[in-house]
Image (spheres, rainbow, N blue to C red):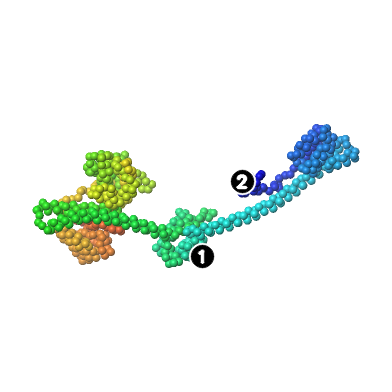
Amino acid sequence: MTKTAAARVPQGAWRAEPKGPPDLDAPLQARILIVDDDERNAFAAVQALEELGHELVVARSGEEALKRLLTEEFALILLDLHMPGMDGYETAALIRSRKRTADTPIVFLTAIFRDEAHIFQAYSAGAVDVVFKPVDPFILKAKTKVFTDLYLKTQEANRQSAYKQWLLDEHTRVKSEKAQTERALRRAEAQQQAILKSLPIVFTSRSIEPPFQTLFVSESVKEITGFPASRFTDEAEFGTSRIHPDDLERTVKSIQNALKTGHYSTEFRWLCADGQYRVLHDQGVIAPSDDGEAREIFGVILDATDRRSLEEQLAQARKMEAVGQLTGGVAHDFNNLLTVVLGNIDMLARKQEEEARRARRFDAIRQAAERGRDLTRQLLAFSRRQHLSPVTLDVNALIRDFAPLMRQAVGEAVTLDLELDEAAGALNTHVDPTQLETALLNLAVNARDAMPEGGRLTIGTCRRPSEAGLGFICVEVRDTGVGMSTEVRERVFEPFFTTKEVGKGSGLGLSQVYGFVRQSEGEVELESHVGAGTTFRLLLPATEAKAEVRAETAPTEVVGGTERILLVEDDATVLALTLDVLTGLGYKVTTATNAAEALAVLHSGAEVDLLFTDVVMPGGVSGVSLARTARELRPDLRVLLTSGFVGDGQVIEGREFPLLDKPYETAVMASMLRKLLDRPDKKRKRARESAAAE
């Protein structure tokens, strides 16, 4: 191989694979070469030597014997002296001349040359012995056994020597590989330490039991916390003792739950050496032992302070942007409404007008107030804080009954098709029917505006299963309009966001749809592409309850009474107005501005038939709490709650008390009062039933 060729050989290519040790238990066997041109003599020799158990090879001439000796090894050569062509002397000379066979023992076989001269010549040719023919089997076997035993002992000695040499070589190889491995390990450890020090990551190993004592922590912990690694490993509770008290319980539970899930991820505030809290992101896995039991926790800790700060800044920026958009929209719409209200009130106060014009001004004021009420309800719907009155209803029945109004809203240029799934049985859900109709109307009007040249609006229903619960009732509203771009789809549910011209829409319709569905524990799906139409899917929780009969429409007749009402309202203006309305209806009214005053009235023994109270009041006691306390004092007391916004933590669960939403009309309030006051007294009813039974 030339130097150039050798240079191309990869490093390590010359290293031979280590050979295995010689098998010391393998049986040794000698091979004997019988050279005789006479078949009978060769056969006789074979017969005499078979008992020794060695391999016997017969060659019929000196030439054949030499060919075999080129590639084969023999323990002994039995060579006939008198052979045609190449005789025994010549053959022996050639055998001795070759290095491979120079030491192979040769025993001459002869029947003719028995004199001393020939025997001396035989020994001179390299023979170790001479056997005369006819061969005595016993003598031949004895002489052969001496040489084969010597050969086998030599082979065994060589094998033992080879084994010892293999042991030495193996020891040297293992020692060399061990040294190389140790050097590679030291290099790897040095590289690992350098990497660990350079990374802003802390690697840890901790106990699985609280306080999760640190078993190992990388030196990079000092860069983040200001404390050396030894503080964490030497002091069992050092790591947990500096977690912010508000984060400690949550963090401990997160790590403890990892024993069940196999992993954890948590963030907490940690008090560093400089006295400042930093946000650390800690995540890890449970390392099992050989028997499968949890042994320790391997984890990493990252400094998430900067990321958390950026996230908070981004969230604040988005919040301020949303508040700015919301504030602008509310200010725009309410300023328009207040302009109408204040302008008409000013005109009414400054001059006398004919009755018809005064009536128009009152009507304009009412319309502006109702528009403000609807705007407030849409905002509450978006924030999912509106007061809902859910009932169990059949979605298909509601859509069929509401379809005529939707056809009127979309106009003649739009074809409205219904694809209601009737095969799946009643599609019942528990939602506020008025809000569902409003949502459908908003979607229908939006679809109409997206199809200025006309098109097709399809409303379909189906049942969609889910892994948990009864699944959902899907209401699909699909149009063939212009569709939405990606930018519009991302903002379509934001309040006051609209692509319509000024004055064509408030931008609250889809916000109301989204807020209502989410507050009803449902989901909203949207699919839309420019030029390919839009599809909204309202997923409402399915129920197996039977559909309820829908309530009658709002009353228009105002009916009063003479019962005694305890009115509780903290707003002086609302209190005065409500007092005038109630006394105008004939009721006897006692007023209170907070829960304490109302309870004082009840404790005084004054007769009260009904408690009419606001929900949100100052003093720390809500209208709900007041109503419950009043019921404990007077179990037969009727209760009616009212509120413009119940607020966080004040949602009335289970419809414990009836609620009248502000702003309310006199007819609606009067109707609810009469329903409550005209309801039979439970005690009297039970007494009558008991008397009838007797």
Q: From the viewer's perspective, is 106 left or right of 368?
A: right
Q: Position of residue 451 (x, y in %)?
A: 27, 42
* Viewer-nearest residue: 107 or 669: 107
Residue topped by disc 2: 8
- Secondary structure at badge 1 equals helix
- Secondary structure at badge 2 equals loop
* Viewer-nearest residue: 385 or 200: 200
* Viewer-nearest residue: 633 or 447: 447
Residue topped by disc 1: 230
Distance between mark 1 and mark 2 Cα atoms: 51 Å
Q: From the viewer's perspective, is 105 left or right of 549?
A: right
Residue 317 badge: none
Q: Position of residue 307 (x, y in %)?
A: 41, 58
Please, what is the three-letter code of the amino acid marked with disc 1?
A: Ser
Residue in the picture at 24% in, 54% down: 332
Classify residue 302 by image quadrant: bottom left
Q: Position of residue 687 (x, y in %)?
A: 22, 56
Residue in the picture at 28% in, 48% down: 499
Mark 2, other Cα within 10 Å: few <14 / some 14–19 / many ≥20:
few
Please, what is the three-letter code of the amino acid marked with disc 2?
A: Arg
Numbered disc total: 2
